[in-house]
Amino acid sequence: MYDSGQEPVRDNENRLSRRRVLGSGALLGAATAVGTTVGVGSGHGDPAGPEVLGAGGVDITLRVNGRDRALRVEPRVTLLDALRERLDLTGTKKGCDQGACGACTVLVDGERVNACLTLAIMVRDKEITTIEGLARGDRLSPVQEAFLDRDAFQCGYCTPGQIVSATALIAEGHTRSAEEIREWMSGNICRCAAYPNIVAAIEDVAR
């Protein structure tokens, strides 16, 4: 039973109401998308809005191994491809290209990152260190020397990423035990299974 002043809601009216709601939501979503920019913000509080980066090339400067390197890249170019293909720093390896193997590990402001998952334009104002930047002239870094002394590699493809990651791990202080070293190096895969020698090399430097 209905009150005398109340009309029953018919199915077709209910469906029409849902369509209107969904249609309104779609229009709102489209309006939001139109107002959204794709790119990297200028970071300077520009009232005109964030910097919009399209599909064309962008002039950037990367500070790599203590040197400023100017290049023009598309916004979609990864740091890994910029290093290898544009700056000829091929020590950083392309393995899985999915952030799963660690072969492309570099340091950005001292922290480990997967270069294959990092866009070059994201690190324009940061200090980037690759395997080529660890040595001082002809003198290898302590971690590089330890890897040689311990024969901590076989094919060597993962070794640059292992050494860069180990360098950061030691600076982070995660060397209190072999188990801790293995845990904090777990993002770097060695398909040749040289893990015992890698851990031993890190322990040598950490002592």
Image (tube, rainbow, N blue to C red):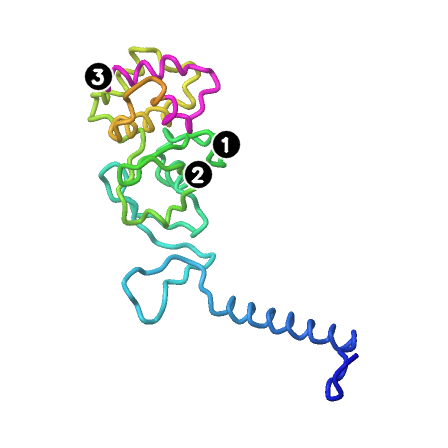
Q: Secondary structure at mark 3?
A: loop
Label 1 sits on residue: 96
Alpha-carbon span between mark 2 and mark 1: 9 Å
For the point 20% across and 21% down, the residue is 139
The answer to whether the residues at label 2 and label 1 have Cβ atoms under 8 Å apart is yes
* Range shown magenta: 182-207
For the point 31% across and 25% down, the residue is 166
Q: Secondary structure at mark 1?
A: loop
Q: Which mark is residue 116?
A: 2
Label 3 sits on residue: 207
Quadrant of res 127: top left
Image coordinates of residue 152 in percent, x first then y, are 36, 14
The crowding category of the residue bearing disc 3, from other C-alpha atoms within 10 Å (few below 14, some 14 to 19, many at least 20), is few
Alpha-carbon span between mark 1 and mark 3: 33 Å
User: Between residues 104 and 14, which one lies in front from this camera angle?
Assistant: 14
Question: Is 190 inside the magenta-drawn segment?
Answer: yes
For the point 23% across and 40% down, the residue is 67
Question: Is 89 inside the magenta-drawn segment?
Answer: no
Amino acid, disc 3? Arg
Image coordinates of residue 183 in percent, x first then y, are 39, 25
Please tell me which of labels 1 and 3 falls first in the chain. 1
For the point 20% across and 25% down, the residue is 137
Amino acid, disc 2? Cys
The crowding category of the residue bearing disc 1, from other C-alpha atoms within 10 Å (few below 14, some 14 to 19, many at least 20), is few
Which image quadrant: the N terminus? bottom right
Q: Judge whether 194 appears above or below 167 on screen.
A: above
Which image quadrant: the C terminus? top left
